[in-house]
Image (cartoon, rainbow, N blue to C red):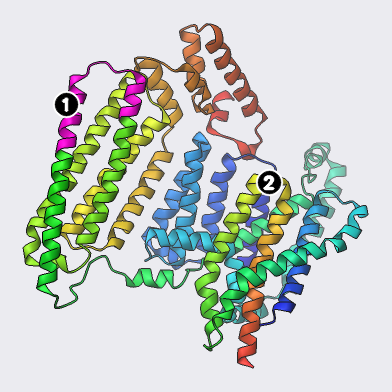
Amino acid sequence: MSIGKTIAKATLLATCIFWFLIFCDDLDLGMLPFVFLSMIPICLCCSLVIIFTIAPFFWTCNKEQNGTEIVFQWFFPFYAIACFCLCAYGFWKAPDAVSFFTAAFFTSLQSWVWLAKKKVTKLES
Amino acid sequence: MKKISLLIGAVLFSTLFYKQSLGLNMSLFSIVTIVILATYNPKSFKQKSSIAFSLLYLISAISIFFFQSSLSFIANFVAFFTLVGHVSEHKSSIYVSWLNGFYSFVAGFFHRNFNPHEKEEKVKIKRDIDYVHWIKIIGIPLIVVIIFILLYRNGNPVFNDLTSKINFSFINIQWLLLTVLGYYLLYNISEPIPVNPATTIDLETKNTLKNKGEFSIKSVKNENQLGVVLISLLNLLIIFFLVTDFTFLFSTQDLMASVFSSQVHSGINALIASIIIAIIIILYFFRGNLNFFEGSKKLKSLAYIWIVLNAILVINTAIKDCQYIYYFGFTYKRIGVLVYLLLTVIGLATTAIKVNQIKNLWYLFRVNSVTAFAILIIACTINWDKHITYYNLNHAQSIDFFYLTKLSNNNTFLLKEYSDNIPLKGENKIRVDRKYRNYLKKLKDNNWQEFTYDNLKID
């Protein structure tokens, strides 16, 4: 499982979603430097979420051949539902932060897929 | 063809919901949802149950068009998740359908993205699609039609006027984003996914308890003795409680509203605690071998008596609530108490069936969740605000007019009619007129997507 690569990809995806939604609302080219600067906190958020909430599920499945698939099937649905509820609650409480919660939701779910797929490929090879 | 139905659905989604409040659009969206589900899952829609759930979903959506109440919104969402979950696995329990429906709605795209087998199938389908053919079919007629429209515009002033009214200014980046969101949601639900192993476990779990073979007679006897003593004592206690409560109920003539309120609420609290404990104790004793022990007939009889006594407790609380309503009119809380009592009676009845027919815990969950769902759908078809207002204005001994004006707009016309027939004065008149004016303005400002039944009344 390549957590480093997943964090890098997640940071890129989250930054894209976050800023795309902001620029859709109000395109201000003066904000462009902040796009790159924002990658630092976004990377930090992605690292924390992936290391503490997603990766531990996969650390438990090293021994079995189809462990990743089982972990994905068992835990991903409940993780996705919990993540959706948290993000929806966040959006309800702070509608201005829609871009943050949208980025958080899609990035965390896609990170699951990346981590699970990496693991499958590694085991097959 | 299927992808095109999703695209059309996504465009309809943003057309219906972009910068619109909810009304007719929810009813139309429910039709779109059912069409997409039926297109992608024709086998599932051969089941009568799928058609029944689709109808319930439509009913809840139509109730939004009629009443726009919070209850109809909740019922609509629950019916939506039930239908989607039911399509994923029609034999599963309703609560598993809710889980499957919600999961498919939230993350169906990611699930299918992970599953390698499904992806292989998709690649095969993709190879069959002739994109050039589709571009020709859509692109060439579109260009030709646009050229002819431009030609006809110059030749016919009426046609020119009509075509100039076509306005695509609503299409902007946010509208497109909403279309993408609509596509994501419709794609998610198009092929609903069962959550495993929850669905598999649910399918394997039957409703009936099975005799696990030989068991220790001594331990079962001891458990039976404990059950008889415990439930006998609890029966005596509840009889004593009921006698004192009925004595109080029939000995007092006129009560203050606050006394009534505390009576009903303390009754409800006692009822909740009593019934939860009753069901837990019954489930504990009848969880296994005691069901098959011949000497447990006495315990079973005591359990039935306890269930009946709890039902009497329900009736007692219902009488208090009805008296409360008779004197002070309906409110949502008082109706909520009656609904809770109805659910309680059903819960007690299913517990009695569980003991009698040796059912398991899952039977209780299954039957009671279906009952709760049915009551939710029935409740959403009732215009509560209008009925509350009508009863309180015409039959209640005292009227809380401020409460009635604070209800939703569903009672506005009724209040206005009452205000005109029995000329109101002062603050109440001002409140009713303000409410009526604001509602009329809101109705007139509604776009076609936001249309409600009341729009038809003012036109």
Residue shown at 18% from the left, 35% from the top: B242
Residue with the mark numbered 2 = A94
Q: Secondary structure at mark 2?
A: loop
Q: Is residue A66 above or below residue B269?
A: below
| Residue type at the position of mark 2 | Ala
The residue closer to the viewer here, B34 or B226, is B226
Q: Does the magenta run of residues contain A76?
A: no
Q: CA distance from mark 2 to mark 1?
A: 53 Å
Q: Position of residue B403 (x, y in %)?
A: 48, 22
Residue shown at 80% from the left, 36% from the top: B158
Taking the image as shown, residue B360 lies to the left or right of residue B261, namely left
Q: Which numbered dot is residue B247?
A: 1
The residue closer to the viewer here, B442 or B24, is B442
State the extent of the magenta-drawn residues as a range: B240-263
| Residue type at the position of mark 1 | Thr
Q: Secondary structure at mark 1?
A: helix
